[in-house]
Amino acid sequence: MKHYSFEELKVGVSESFKVTVTEEMIDAFRKMSGDENPLHCDEEYAEKCGFAGRVVYGMLTASFFSTLAGVYLPGERCLLQEVNSRFRAPVYAGDELTVEGSVKERHEGFKRIRILATIRNQDGKKVSSAEIWAGVRE
């Protein structure tokens, strides 16, 4: 876990990490959220809809933006305030995702930063993007 102070978080500071989405993650998210949409639960249904298989929940993918802020940028001192995410391409079980973020703005008075973030799959395709606002606790 990173421990950035507000003073260390200059515009341009970046962090990234990789995660592989598993069937177990998808099933756990399904149980936790109660989302039974067959696009996420039924392989055959998803294929009939033109996808390569069950589609990973967009919100499961977006949860990695929380990991980015809460563990990496700024890390321990993070107070996540807002995440505006976009889903750009489907994610499937077995995809290796690279989550990256960079500080784009600092607000001294509120000790808060704006992070622009992306998630790319193993082929380099952007599957999600986000604007993240996070307070940085002392």
Image (cartoon, rainbow, N blue to C red):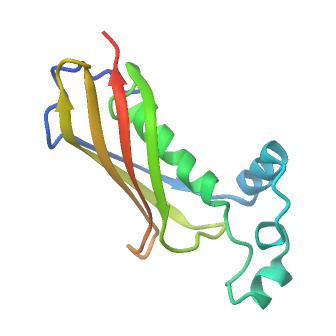
Q: Quadrant of the N terminus?
A: top left
Q: Give above or below for 52 relative to 78.
A: below
Who's the residue at 80% across and 54% down the image?
27
- Quarter residue 113 falls in: top left
- Quarter residue 114 falls in: top left
- Left or right? Give the position of 52 relative to 137: right
Q: Give above or below for 93 relative to 83.
A: below
- Left or right? Give the position of 107 relative to 37: left
Q: Quadrant of the C terminus?
A: top left
Q: Nearer the viewer, residue 49 or 75?
A: 49
- Left or right? Give the position of 31 relative to 70: right
**Percent coordinates x, y for residue 118 in the rendering:** 37, 58
Who's the residue at 71% across and 51% down the image?
25
Who's the residue at 48% across and 71% down the image?
88
Q: Nearer the viewer, residue 9 or 98?
A: 9
**Percent coordinates x, y for residue 81 in the rendering:** 44, 31
- Left or right? Give the position of 24 relative to 72: right
**Percent coordinates x, y for residue 68 in the rendering:** 42, 40
Q: Give above or below for 30 relative to 13.
A: below
Who's the residue at 15% across and 43% down the image?
12
**Percent coordinates x, y for residue 71 in the rendering:** 43, 31
Furthest residue in direction front, as rendered: 109
Q: How many marks?
A: 0
Q: Nearer the viewer, residue 39 or 4?
A: 39
